[in-house]
Image: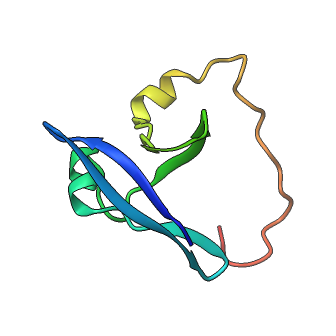
Amino acid sequence: MSACGYNVYMGACHDMKARVRKRGNSTSVQIPVAVLHAAKLRRGQSVDVHEESGRIVIEPVHRKEYSLEKLLQGITHKNLHDKADFGKHAGREA
């Protein structure tokens, strides 16, 4: 295994080294806490990982927030479906 280096800007440029390791059927890189804080990431957070010009880019996944009011405003006569008939009740669901 070879070491993987990356630069992180935290007021001054620091070189931090990490190792690419095998974890089960996956590969992992431990990210130093200082890098997590600088990138405003936290443990357990969902991230998008992709390759860009030969570099590995890790970005936070931003959850889209929905409100019931906003969703209900999107219902129109054109997109409102007909009542669905699933037949007679088979158990005690009614």
From the viewer's perspective, is 51 left or right of 68?
Answer: right
Residue at the (47%, 58%) spot, across then down = 4
Residue at the (41%, 54%) spot, across then down = 5
Count of picture labels: 0
From the viewer's perspective, is 52 left or right of 81?
Answer: left
Name the residue nearer the viewer: 32 or 67. 32
Q: Is residue 77 above or below residue 49?
A: above
In which quadrant is the N terminus drawn? Answer: bottom right
Outermost right residue: 87
Q: Quadrant of residue 8?
A: top left
Name the residue nearer the viewer: 91 or 34. 34
Q: Position of residue 18 (x, y in %)?
A: 39, 64
Report the colour scheme: rainbow
Q: Position of residue 71 (x, y in %)?
A: 50, 30
Q: Is residue 46 above or below residue 80?
A: below
Q: Quadrant of residue 11?
A: top left
Q: Position of residue 25 (x, y in %)?
A: 67, 78
In which quadrant is the C terminus drawn? Answer: bottom right
Outermost bottom residue: 24
Residue at the (18%, 41%) spot, across then down = 10
Q: Position of residue 79 (x, y in %)?
A: 71, 23
Name the residue nearer the viewer: 63 or 13. 13
From the viewer's perspective, is 3 left or right of 80?
Answer: left
Outermost left residue: 11
Residue at the (22%, 46%) spot, across then down = 38
